[in-house]
Image (spheres, rainbow, N blue to C red):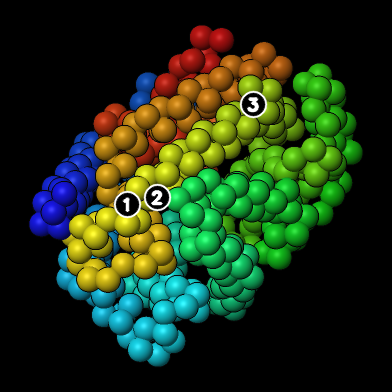
């Protein structure tokens, strides 16, 4: 393939994915606005009209910002690739650092920082304007800066050595380098998943043992029925950042722990908390986490193999506006353009995720009362201002969870 033809292929894929994303968001915007003043039948008497309108307005505000972000992201991608931006950054770093591994690390760091600062206004507006306007943001500026510093430190401490190992393997392991990189990537991800509950998460939040004796007894009885062993039940101070509530379990083996947001415990009754946890345990019972890890491993191996084919193709670099290729540049280009080609396939992964959610709901309905999970979901939809009327096509591409009306209808039938 010639560079010219690959440029045309890239531009066509970018136009398709961008046009599709914009069209879906506009559809979603219009659909939510059109249903703003009427509560869906499944929620009449459970969600007040004012609460439904708030959810619609919240969704509209987020989608409008998202439309702007799509346009900015596409403009930046074109400027960095066909516009020659990456080539200029690459050459400047070569003149300063040479062409060794330090150059590769600096290239990723430079592009990462550029993306961070370009996306910063939208991120701040989302947190301190939209989330604050609808009563969700609890984040203070000191805490925001602290989170930023901790996140940057983790990126350097974990991402830096991993990237260095990847670049080294790409250089020295011959034509099958992609397999060795995959092994390192997989091992690193599993290590992070193992360390996250006890090492990483406590850097950002405080975790305290669940003290409510009656609730603890109820949950322990549920765990016994489900055959789930956990290292502990913990409450996370999520309220210091947001009013949104959630619950999850994390970790592997003996490191598994169940975590409740303090905001969730404040909003739900004990039987509703039990039902929400039963849903999370449904993911465990159906091995959804392991299935997703396995799928991610297979896909990452396929993508690395594909990158191995592209690494020595001059048209890949030249077609994306880069004159001279390197292992670092190939990895960076690939990570930047791959989402462009994959977005039309989003319904496949979203559909799998929604199927898992239905299975977890069904499991919860077996272990607890379906009515309790319905009541919990209604409260969570209300308190999180989640729209009850998403556009079906938009949901097909973007939503990892089924629309609220579908979940409630299935649970009612159970």
Quadrant where the image shows the C terminus: top right
Reading the image, the residue beneath label 2 is: 308
Q: Please give the label number shown on residue 287.
A: 3
**Along the line of sight, which residue is nearer the eye, 324 or 126?**
324
**Against 122, is 45 above or below?**
above
Question: Who's the residue at 41% across and 27% down the image?
Answer: 351
Measured in 3D between alpha carbons, the distance from the residue under mark 3 to the one under mark 1, in whole angstroms, is 35 Å
**Against 214, is 332 above or below?**
below
Is residue 62 toward the left or the right of residue 158 in the image? Answer: left
Instruction: Kindly indicate whether the residue at mark 2 contacts the one at mark 1 (C-beta within 8 angstroms).
Output: yes
Residue 121 on image: x %, y %: 36, 72
Give the mark toward the camera: 2 or 3: 2
Q: Mark 2 packing: few (<14 Cα in 10 Å), some, or many (20+)?
A: many
Would you say residue 236 is visible in this rendering?
no
Measured in 3D between alpha carbons, the distance from the residue under mark 2 to the one under mark 3, in whole angstroms, is 32 Å
Helix, strand or loop at mark 1 = helix
Measured in 3D between alpha carbons, the distance from the residue under mark 1 to the one under mark 2, in whole angstroms, is 6 Å
Reading the image, the residue beneath label 1 is: 310
């Amino acid at each position: 393939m010639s560079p010219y033809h690959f440029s045309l292929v890239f531009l066509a894929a970018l136009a398709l994915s961008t046009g599709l994303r914009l069209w879906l968001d506009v559809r979603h915007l219009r659909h939510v606005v059109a249903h703003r003043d009427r509560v869906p039948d499944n929620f009449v008497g459970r969600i007040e009209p004012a609460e439904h309108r708030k959810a619609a307005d919240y969704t509209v505000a987020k989608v409008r910002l998202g439309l702007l972000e799509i346009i900015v992201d596409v403009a930046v991608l074109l400027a960095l690739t066909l516009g020659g931006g990456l080539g200029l950054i690459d050459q400047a770093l070569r003149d300063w650092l040479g062409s060794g591994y330090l150059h590769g690390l600096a290239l990723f760091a430079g592009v990462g920082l550029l993306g961070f600062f370009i996306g910063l206004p939208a991120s701040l507006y989302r947190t301190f304007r939209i989330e604050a306007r609808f009563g969700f943001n609890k984040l203070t500026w000191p805490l925001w800066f602290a989170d930023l510093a901790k996140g940057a430190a983790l990126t350097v401490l974990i991402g830096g050595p991993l990237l260095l190992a990847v670049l080294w393997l790409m250089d020295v392991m011959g034509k099958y380098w992609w397999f060795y990189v995959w092994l390192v990537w997989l091992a690193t991800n599993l290590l992070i998943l193992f360390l996250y509950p006890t090492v990483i998460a406590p850097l950002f939040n405080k975790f305290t043992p669940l003290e409510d004796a009656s609730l603890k007894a109820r949950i322990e009885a549920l765990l016994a029925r489900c055959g789930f062993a956990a290292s502990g039940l913990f409450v996370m101070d999520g309220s210091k950042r947001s009013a949104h509530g959630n619950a999850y379990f994390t970790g592997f083996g003996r490191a598994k722990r169940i975590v409740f947001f303090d905001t969730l415990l404040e909003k739900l009754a004990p039987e509703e908390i039990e039902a929400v946890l039963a849903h999370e345990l449904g993911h465990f019972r159906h091995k959804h986490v392991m299935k997703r890890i396995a799928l991610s491993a297979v896909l990452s191996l396929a993508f690395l193999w594909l990158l191995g084919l592209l690494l020595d193709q001059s048209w890949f670099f030249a077609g994306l506006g880069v004159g001279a290729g390197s292992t670092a540049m190939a990895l960076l280009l690939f990570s930047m353009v791959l989402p462009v080609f994959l977005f039309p396939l989003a319904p496949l992964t979203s559909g799998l995720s929604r199927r898992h959610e239905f299975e977890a709901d069904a499991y919860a309905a077996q272990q607890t009362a379906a009515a309790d999970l319905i009541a919990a979901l209604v409260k969570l939809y209300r308190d999180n201002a989640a729209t009850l009327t998403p556009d079906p096509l938009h949901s097909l591409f973007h939503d990892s969870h089924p629309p609220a009306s579908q979940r409630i209808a299935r649970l009612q039938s159970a």
